[in-house]
Amino acid sequence: NHHKNTRSLSVEDEIRGTVSLHHKEGRLYKAGKDMVTGILDLSDVTVEDVMVHRSNIFMVDIDDEPKEIINQVIDSPYSRIPVWKDNSENIIGLIHAKNILKILSKKNSKEIKKNDIKNSLVKTWFVPETTSLKDQLQMHLTRKIKLAMVIDEYGALNGIISLEDIIEEIVGDISDEHDLDLSDITRERDGSLIVNGTTEIRNINRSYGWKLPEEEANTISGFLIHESRSFPKNGQVFHFYGFKF
């Protein structure tokens, strides 16, 4: 096993070296280099690192009126929506917009009953937050699922992860740079940056080549709270890891 692990590590290093060399020599576009590197990094990243946190999940209560549920699904930008009963921790399935449209093709919204919606729910998969993205990607592909609910060590809902989240992680540098420049980070004339506190550290590190630690916090806000051991006040200044905050 030790020999096998050593061999796989050397192969991985070989691939990284080849990618870097071809990139330097101009034979590999940055997008291609980033994608290959992103795939190699999947084993080092967990679903918790890239999931959508539970506070940002759009969910539907099965006990709402059927007409209201249908309106929520139609108005939502998502094609698959988690459904809960009694409390938001108790996820009983996923509503697929396609299934709702099938129901609407047979009945008008006033005729639809709760059981119609219940019977259309898709099975939900639950995965531990410590699952590597490599394993998670394998699960998405072998089971042909698009969404999975992420749970912590106690079985409590922690977030949601989609196949798109993993793909974005692989090609992240291609899209994240533009996303960050437009919405999360503003560069001032003096070269300083105004950063949204909810911006993920790993996105900043990847986009700007920084090496801020990612182990103890996911966002810039969390990073500052952790490093300063306080809740920063307006105007406070900190110096961490070669940067002035």
Image: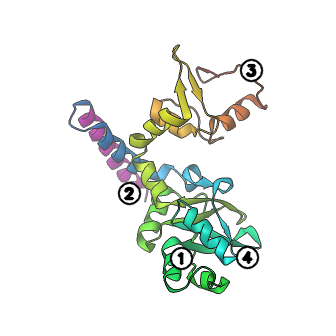
Q: Which residue is disc 1 drawn over?
A: 100
Question: Mark 2, mark 4: which one is toward the viewer?
Answer: 4
Q: Secondary structure at mark 2?
A: helix
* Most common SS among magenta residues: helix
Closer to the eye: label 3 or 2? 3
Residue range (magenta)? 1-23
Question: What residue is disc 4 on?
Answer: 63
- From mark 2 to mark 4, how far is it between C-alphas? 53 Å
Distance, label 3 to label 1, CA atoms, is 51 Å
Question: What colouring style does the render use?
Answer: rainbow
Type of amino acid at the residue the image marks with label 1: Ile
The residue type indicated by label 4 comes to: Asp
Residue 79 vertical position relative to residue 204 in the rendered view, above or below? below
Tell me which label, 3 or 1, sits earlier in the chain: 1
The three-letter amino acid code for the residue at tag 2 is Lys
Q: CA distance from mark 1 to mark 4?
A: 16 Å
The percent position of residue 231, horizontal first and vertical second, equals 78, 32
> Circle 1: is it few (<14), some (14-19), or many (20+) Cα within 10 Å?
some
According to the picture, the residue beneath numbered tag 2 turns out to be 4
Q: What residue lies at 59% left-to-right and 57% top-to-bottom? A: 130
- Indicate the amino acid at tag 3: Gln
